């Protein structure tokens, strides 16, 4: 049975977008994956760039507000930053809630290469976590 998964972070620009990309790849036809923020900041171009380096195209993703998905019966709500977990609006759902705080690459400073390295670091952490989530939750 197809599962509905929502990935939440603050601005739906980096971490939740990367998680959506990997969850779609790893879950395949076992899940419909959505991402949203408690604010919308637009999809970060560096996130698009470093995901493309790993063969995943998120350039067509949109930055969505969590309120847009109130009508979807989610099976899982995954928060990928502490701020989203603290500020997440109440979802009247039986969804299993899982949380992992990933570093925010949008806060990285330095040269462009140093900033991209911060994005790659966050991407790799998110990739491993998403792979584990799919293995544990969607392939029992």
Image (tube, grey):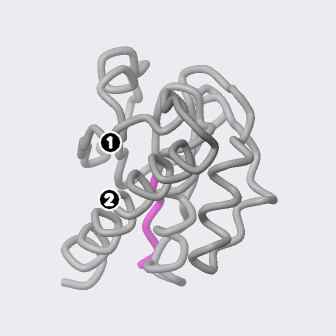
Asked whether 88 falls inside the magenta stretch, the response is: no
Predominant SS along the magenta part:
strand
Q: Is residue 14 above or below residue 107?
A: below
C-alpha separation, residue under disc 1 versus residue under disc 2 = 7 Å
Q: Residue placed at 27% from the left, 67% from the top?
A: 133
Q: Quadrant of the N terminus?
A: bottom left
Q: Where is residue 134 in the image (x, y as percent from the top left)?
A: 31, 74
- In this orientation, which residue lies closer to the viewer: 32 or 108? 108
**Label 1 SS:** loop
- Number of marks in the rendered image: 2
In the image, the segment drawn in magenta is 1-5
Q: Where is residue 9 in the image (x, y as percent from the top left)?
A: 46, 33
- In this orientation, which residue lies closer to the viewer: 22 or 136? 22
Is any atom of residue 70 visible in this view?
no
Residue 125, numbered label: 2
Residue 75, numbered label: none
Is any atom of residue 34 visible in this view?
yes
For the residues labelled 1 and 2, say whether their Cβ atoms are less than 8 Å apart: yes
Categorize mark 2 by other alpha carbons within 10 Å: few (<14), some (14-19), many (20+).
few
Q: Is residue 116 above or below residue 66?
A: below
Q: Where is residue 69 in the image (x, y as percent from the top left)?
A: 61, 38
Q: Residue placed at 39% from the left, 25% from the top?
A: 84
Identify residue for label 1: 102
Q: Which residue lies furthest to the right in this view?
A: 60
Q: In which quarter of the image is the C terminus?
A: bottom left
Q: Residue placed at 69% from the left, 41% from the top?
A: 44
- Report which quarter residue 58 is drawn in: bottom right
Q: Residue placed at 35% from the left, 46% from the top?
A: 78
Categorize mark 1 by other alpha carbons within 10 Å: few (<14), some (14-19), many (20+).
some
**Left of 2 or right of it: where is 76?**
left
Which badge, 1 or 2, is on the more N-terminal residue?
A: 1
């Amino acid at each position: 049975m197809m599962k509905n998964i929502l990935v939440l972070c603050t601005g739906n620009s980096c971490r939740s977008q990367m998680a959506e990309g990997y969850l779609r790849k790893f879950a395949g036809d076992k899940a419909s994956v959505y991402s949203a923020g408690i604010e919308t900041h637009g999809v970060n171009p560096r996130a698009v760039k470093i995901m493309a380096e790993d063969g995943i195209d998120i350039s067509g993703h949109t930055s969505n507000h969590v309120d847009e998905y109130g009508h979807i019966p989610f099976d899982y709500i995954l928060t990928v930053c502490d701020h989203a977990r603290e500020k997440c609006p109440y979802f009247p759902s039986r969804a299993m809630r899982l949380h992992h705080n990933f570093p925010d690459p949008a806060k990285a400073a330095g040269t462009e290469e140093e900033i991209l390295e911060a994005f790659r670091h966050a991407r790799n952490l998110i990739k491993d976590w998403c792979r584990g989530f799919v293995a544990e939750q969607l392939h029992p």
